[in-house]
Structure formats: structure tokens, C-alpha cells
Image: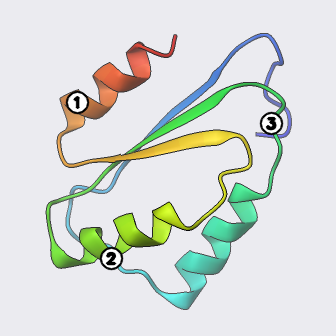
Amino acid sequence: MAEWPKTQPYLVIHDFRDGNIALTPYARSRTEELIKIPIGVPGYAAIILPRTFVSTVIRMFMRVQKSGGIENRLFFDYDEGLNWLKSKM
């Protein structure tokens, strides 16, 4: 991310629909490290999760995190997340 070309928006989709996710202390610390990396261009991340109790907790966690310039959105539908990213191109 630190090497991303400054002339292009940063667009990424994180697909975690397999339902095998957990908000562990390790996952939280790694997420906080990534959030702090400045990219210097507009950035957008679509996070795709299954509709579960864990994803509800993750949504609450995301609301209190600063994104370091990347706008993160959580989706329960892959196509909806992809269309949101396409709108940012």
C-alpha cells in the first residue's frame, strides 16, 4: 500500500464469505497496523462477510476504527460490494 501509484485510487475487495472468520486479538492487531499505513490517494475497501453474529460484531468494530484515508464498507453481498467499488473508479 505504501508503494501504490499516486495517480490511481486504491480499490480492494476482501471476501470473507466462507464463514471461517473470527475477531481474534491477532486479527485485530494486524488490522490496526494496516489502518495506519498512509497511501496518499483515495482508497476504498469493500469487505464481504456472511450475515452472522460475528459479522455484526465486526461491523461495530469497524465503526470505531479510523481508516487512515481508506473508506471501508461492509457488505453481505459480493455484487453489491463490487458495484460500490466500481462507482469509485
What residue is shown at x 15% (from left), y 70% (from top)?
Answer: 52
Q: Residue at x 30, y 20 (%)?
A: 83
The answer to whether 53 is drawn above or below residue 33 in the figure is below
The type of residue carrying mark 1 is Glu
Q: Amino acid at mark 2?
A: Val
Residue drawn at the location 56% of the way across and 89% of the way down? 25
Residue corresponding to mark 1: 80
Residue at 36% x, 80% y: name it. 22
Characterize the local packing of mark 3: few (<14), some (14-19) or many (20 or more) Cα atoms within 10 angstroms. Answer: some
Local secondary structure at mark 1: helix
Q: How is the image coloured?
A: rainbow
CA distance for labels 1 and 3 = 25 Å
Above or below residue 43? Residue 14 is below
Label 1 vs label 2: CA separation?
20 Å
Residue that badge 2 annotates = 57
Under mark 3, the amino acid is Ile
Q: Which mark is residue 43?
A: none
Give residue 62's position: percent from left, percent from top.
48, 63
Disc 2 or disc 3, which is closer to the eye? Answer: 2
Write down the quadrant of residue 64 in the picture. bottom right
Q: Is residue 38 left or right of residue 57?
A: right
Position of 69 with respect to 84 (left or right) is: right
Query: Quick one: quadrant of the N terminus?
Result: top right
Q: Nearer the viewer, residue 74 or 1?
A: 74
Query: Residue 29: x percent and y percent?
Result: 66, 79
Q: Position of residue 73 (x, y in %)?
A: 41, 44
Q: CA distance from mark 2 to mark 3?
A: 27 Å
Q: Indicate the secondary structure of the residue bearing disc 2.
A: helix
Q: Secondary structure at mark 3?
A: loop
Categorize mark 2 by other alpha carbons within 10 Å: few (<14), some (14-19), many (20+): few
Q: What residue would you read off at disc 3?
A: 39
